[in-house]
Amino acid sequence: MNNIHSFASNIKYYYNAINPASLTGAIDVIVVEQPDGSLCSTPFHVRFGKYGVFYSSEKYVDFIVNNKEIKLKMKLDENGVSSIVSEEEPLLMAQTSYIRSLRLSSDELKSLQLQYGSNEARFSVTTKFQGTSWCSCHIYLFKYSDRIVISDIDGTITKSDVRGHVIAAIGGQWAHAGVAELYSRIKQNGYKMVYLSSRAIGQSHYTKTYLQSLAQGSKSLPDGPVLLSPMSVLMAFRKEVIERKPEEFKIACLSDLQSLFPVKHPFYAGFGNRETDVRSYAAVDIPAERILIINPSGTVKRADAGGFSSSYSMMAMEMVDYLFPPLHLAPRRTSEDGGENSIKMEKMRANFTKPETCSTFTHWRTTDTVIVEDELAVYERKRKEMADKNKKASKNKKIARR
């Protein structure tokens, strides 16, 4: 009976997901603090379906962050898609026009008074006949120096691409063993987890609920932004499962996120399960030796075919500190007064020397592009060069004497 009830619930979820009338959702937003203190962010994707707002055109959206009402104007278009509007100066006696955008300016982002980490955002629309409809997401405030680890969801956290894509509420038994332990330890070492999927915006609530509820023993998945596709569910399903081109969205999404960071390589590593994930991560400059691919049986390998083979559980228990060296705190001066309050601690780099290239203490070793000689080899090479040089000079002197 429980199985029948679960199956019926999944069918109901699937119907609601593909039905445009119930396509309501919001995608998490990432805000990055720049070295000069300014802020920039990913787009604010918010959509209301017909069940909540039947006539959506020109309806205003109430915007609340951390239980505080935000004085910004957001409007819906005829498709229920929300955008931020700002007034444009009228020309002569012309009617006031509006500029629509999916992003906030630095000053507008500062007005949200975000805390570092997760901030809850709630969007609501109230109509006379349908009452109040709402959806929510989270806004994450990162620093420009944070190191990001990207993880695909379907087939990477879950065991199945198709079932994970269509039925988000499938339960913890469909997750790869050890994934919660590994990701938790990666975050404990100072890295920020970002979850990426080509699922549609209408599946945002179910996707986040599944990730938050996934528990393996005493461990659950660490908190982090969930970036989804703003397109419809049917279009997302077609790209992911039928056309096999999910990288089109993923590359665009990751490239946009990468552009927010002033540093050259903000993405430290990426987890995926298909060749399309390899192409997506390579497009945003994640080295092949730091792209980890898991197959349906749970075996994890590097994308550069470097001979590495493991599993989530083994990586979590035996080598996480070598794969993802703990980041230490470095002091950063925030003002010139010299007081204690002018110093803040900021994660900057790994404790180990050059963990991203070639270190005796870490896992990441590039295959052929970088060659590092040890001190003994350098000494021996120079000794031979000097001996050959002296031998040649002695031979020339003997010839000159003759």
Image (cartoon, helix red, strand yellow):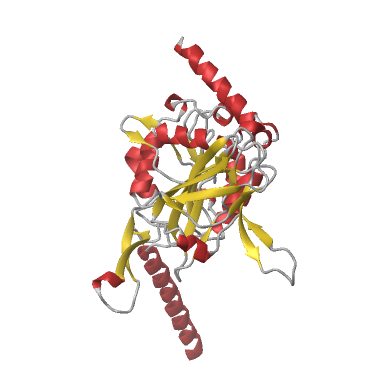
Q: Position of residue 387 (x, y in %)?
A: 41, 74
- Image point 55% across, 27% down: which residue? 167
**In front of the other: 127 or 310:** 127
Report whether residue 156 is seen. no
**In front of the other: 371 or 385:** 371
Q: Position of residue 153 (x, y in %)?
A: 51, 37
**Is 367 on the left or on the right of 17, as rendered?**
left
Q: Position of residue 88 (x, y in %)?
A: 66, 66
Extreme bottom residue here?
A: 401
- Image point 34% across, 58% down: which residue? 352
Total marks shown come to 0
- Image point 56% across, 39% down: which residue? 25
Q: Position of residue 395 (x, y in %)?
A: 47, 81
**In front of the other: 81 or 284:** 81
Q: Is residue 115 above or below residue 17?
A: below
Place residue 237 in its image quadrant. Answer: top right
